Amino acid sequence: MDKVEKSMIIIGIAVVILSLLFYNHAFGDYFAYRENKWDKEPTFCILKPTDYKDFKQYGISMGKIVQAVNTWKQELNQKTESHNWNYSIKVFPTYSSLGGYDCDVVIEFVNTGGGPFGTIECYTIIDTNRQYCDIVIYDQPVNHVLSTIKHEVGHALGLGHRLPWTKCDFAAVILSRDIMMMSAAKHQIITDDSLNALIAFYGKDGFKEPNPITDNKFWITEKPSKCV
């Protein structure tokens, strides 16, 4: 655990204690859904990192990369006790090797740092209503690669960031350790709140049609009773 992470945890705990002492407050935070929603089982195409040897030095194998993409599917199927959250994963050595393969989401790695850990762009072809998503994972710092993959796959499935409901709720978000927090930190996890948000978004039948109409653009984990 680095100094920044320790400081964030200490600040978060302090805010929680002060809130409990001085405010009648139930912590509130939420997910903002993205526009993309799949009406079929999507296919994730992973482009093998060009600097894969460097990845392996840090213990990051293609198996672990595939597992990071698979995690959402496994946890959703386990939570709903169904097999309706399946998606396919294919690995390709280069971008050109994709050829005409029908990819719904393409994950590629860029060997540069200094920017965000990862980005995603989803778009729809108007004539066919066909949806695609492109995920870019920046391989520096390497120790954030796997968690960044999980984070961006959460976006690809339709989740936005986990955000505080009010200025008093930052501690609740930080302490949740949710993988969908806006800022990356070590030891982040896919929480029940993340899974429940996707279940509310799609229904328990997962990617099968028809998906429920989402009138509310947000999944509220808990609404605050009072916050000053």
Image: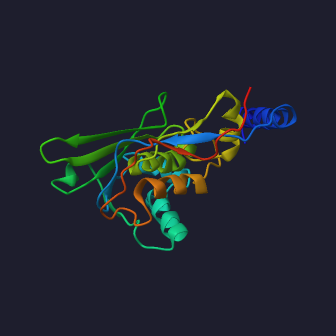
- The image shows a total of numbered marks equal to 0
Residue 94 placement, left or right of 112: left
In this view of the protein, which residue sits in the foreground, 190 or 159?
159
For residue 123, above or below residue 204: above
Q: Quadrant of residue 88?
A: bottom left
Residue 153 placement, left or right of 132: right
User: What color scheme is it?
Assistant: rainbow
Residue at (37% x, 56% y) in the render: 212
In this view of the protein, which residue sits in the foreground, 179 or 33?
33
Quarter of the N terminus within the rendering: top right
Place of residue 103 in the rendered image (x, y in percent of width and height, measured from the top left): 25, 54
In this view of the protein, which residue sits in the foreground, 50 or 172?
172
For residue 219, above or below residue 207: above
Place of residue 190 in the rendered image (x, y in percent of width and height, measured from the top left): 57, 54
Q: Could you tell me if residue 187 is visible in this image?
A: yes
Residue at (29% x, 54% y) in the render: 93
Residue at (51% x, 69% y) in the render: 80
Residue 55 placement, left or right of 215: right
Residue farthest left in this picture: 127
Q: Quadrant of residue 101?
A: bottom left
Place of residue 143 in the rendered image (x, y in percent of width and height, measured from the top left): 57, 45
Place of residue 18 in the rendered image (x, y in percent of width and height, measured from the top left): 84, 32
Residue farthest right in this picture: 21
For residue 195, above or below residue 109: below
Quarter of the C terminus within the rendering: top right
Q: Could you tell me if residue 142 is visible in this image?
A: no
